[in-house]
Amino acid sequence: MTQRRPHWVYDAGQEPDPRFTLANERTFLAWVRTALAMLAGGVALHALGLPDTTWVRNVLAIALVLLGGLVTAFAMIRWARVERAMRTSTPLPAFNLGFLLTGAVLVGAVLLAISFAA
């Protein structure tokens, strides 16, 4: 039993090659940077008053802020699931976070395009 947390990750299996663990941590940090960019984008939309259509601006700003929080939480869960899979020599989990983010960006882009065209 280890002192590291979360125990459900670190108490499973064997210690993987440190390079893989560090790569997993770098991937987690990249997702956190993406989430921070989403938060900043939501704040910028709200502060700058863009687009002119108030409801679109509010929807996008709120969605970006909430999605930034969700991406951070999902990134942590993904980090833990990947770490555990490496420790137990099981297949890596599916890449659902990427699909979520892709869908959100597409919806946001369509809303902005419609707002700018109007």
Image (spheres, rainbow, N blue to C red):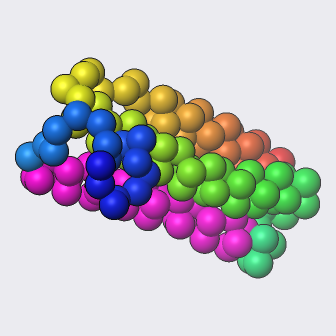
Q: Number of marks in the image?
A: 0
The x, y position of residue 41, in whole percent, is 62, 66
Residue displayed at 14% across by 43% down: 16
Query: Is most of the magenta stretch helix, strand or loop?
Result: helix
Residue displayed at 29% across by 49% down: 1
- Left or right relative to 64: residue 28: left
Residue displayed at 70% across by 60% down: 65
Span shown in magenta: 18-45
Q: Furthest-front residue in view?
A: 1
Q: Furthest-top residue in view?
A: 91
Q: Nearer the viewer, residue 89 or 24?
A: 89
Q: Is residue 7 above or below residue 5?
A: above
- Left or right relative to 103: residue 24: left
The x, y position of residue 93, in whole percent, is 37, 27
Residue displayed at 19% across by 26% down: 89
User: In the image, is residue 74 part of the stretch drawn in magenta?
Assistant: no
User: In the image, is residue 25 part of the stretch drawn in magenta?
Assistant: yes
- Left or right relative to 20: residue 40: right
Q: Nearer the viewer, residue 116 or 43?
A: 43
Q: Furthest-bottom residue in view?
A: 47
The x, y position of residue 60, in whole percent, is 75, 54
- Say if residue 102 shows up in the picture: no
The x, y position of residue 14, in whole percent, is 17, 38
Q: Is residue 63 above or below residue 41?
A: above
- Left or right relative to 117: residue 105: left
- Say if residue 88 shows up in the picture: yes
